[in-house]
Amino acid sequence: MNRTVVVAGASGLVGAAVVEAFAKDGWSVIAVSRRAPEVDARHVHLPVDLQDPVSVRAAVESVGQATHLVYAAVHEKPGLVRGWRDPDQMRTNLQMLQGMLTALEGAPLQHVTLLQGTKAYGVHRHPIRIPARERYPRDPHENFYWLQEDHLRQVAAERGLEWTILRPQLVVGPTYGVAMNLPPVIGAYAAICRATGAPFGFPGGAPYVTEAADVRLTADAALWAATEPRAWGEHFNVTNGEVFEWRDLWPALADELGVDHAPDIPRNLSDFFAAHAATWDQIVAERGLRGLTLDELLGESHHYADFHFAAGAHTPPPPAFVSTVKIRQAGFCAAYDTELSFRHWLRVLIERKVLPAA
């Protein structure tokens, strides 16, 4: 039985984990991304810019027998958050998906998994209903999620495809240089604090409770959805299965990174890192780390950190909890300890010499 999955955005946070999960389950995996994913699993990498539909088609047509697509690619603007309402950002993300689906027209494609997130509920625009449930009407705001979903629905109806949409909350993993991943940000912040003698205090604003999803959980949900009929034609929220508060998590992060836990130091990490690029370069040289600049390490994730840490906020942001009842009732019941998840991925980044050891 042919089981070949194309993973679009394979070098990204979710994409790399999906490559690994499917490969270890025995699938043939075609990884499509500009740079190769950092995974320890057998796959074929196609070095393609997803914004170039001609190149995508030429590359993907060569794989021929793709039966599944996991679309984990995303285009973000510099500064991240302000780009979430940008029509150009939305249009680019739609065109990237269109190019991939067009490239797979001749393949025996059966199922497509698409990634969304809590912006589907309008979390970046207004307070959301608690908990946010997948059955709620579409939130009426402009979002590339809706553009992609509507196009996928149309293509699925024309070609007889099945589809699943996953909505993970604050994905946590080892990938650096991406738009939305916090372990590299937290690890670099700790390293610079240690090097400069500054206290490792939580830099955020008003306290609030939130949720996260380990990237392994998200990848396993995509693997499950690929062959589970109860997942087809459905949306699913994905979280670790528990809530946490940053200040309660911070001592564990300090312990894992070998720095002393300190009282809060409210600051904007985007400004902090801009002022410490040379310090990071010195750390890299002295500790024998990979030759990554801060920009290469962080991507846009320091802006994501400021957003999630509520930097500068004097009142808590509105709660943003999502229900995971639906996916559990459909048969996917995996869960992760959020503290152990952060600890694990920080250790992986240290082992890979992306971050310095304690």
Image (spheres, rainbow, N blue to C red):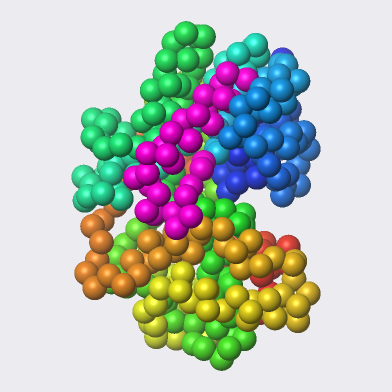
Q: Is residue 302 above or below residue 258?
A: above
Please state the horizontal and vertical placement of residue 357, each as a whole percent of the image. 69, 75
Report whether 124 appears left or right of 29: left
Magenta: predominant secondary structure element?
Answer: helix
Along the viewing direction, whichever of 315 and 234 lies nearer the viewer: 315
Q: Position of residue 187 (x, y in %)?
A: 58, 71
Task: Check the picture and name the quadrant holding the C terminus.
Answer: bottom right
Query: In the depicted view, which residue is nearer to us: 130 or 334?
Result: 130
Numbered range of the magenta stretch: 74-103
**Which residue appears at 24% of the width and 73% of the height?**
314
Q: Quadrant of the N terminus?
A: top right
Residue occupying the point 62% across, 20% down: 103
Residue 226: image location, x then y, percent? 56, 26
**Which sits in the foreground, 142 or 349?**
142
**What residue sits 48% from the left and 76% below the top?**
272
The answer, for residue 3, to whether it is visible in the render is no
Tell me which corner region of the image, top left, top right, bottom left or bottom right, holds residue 131: top left
In the displayed structure, does residue 221 sit left or right of residue 66?
left
Position of 109 relative to 242 (above/below): above
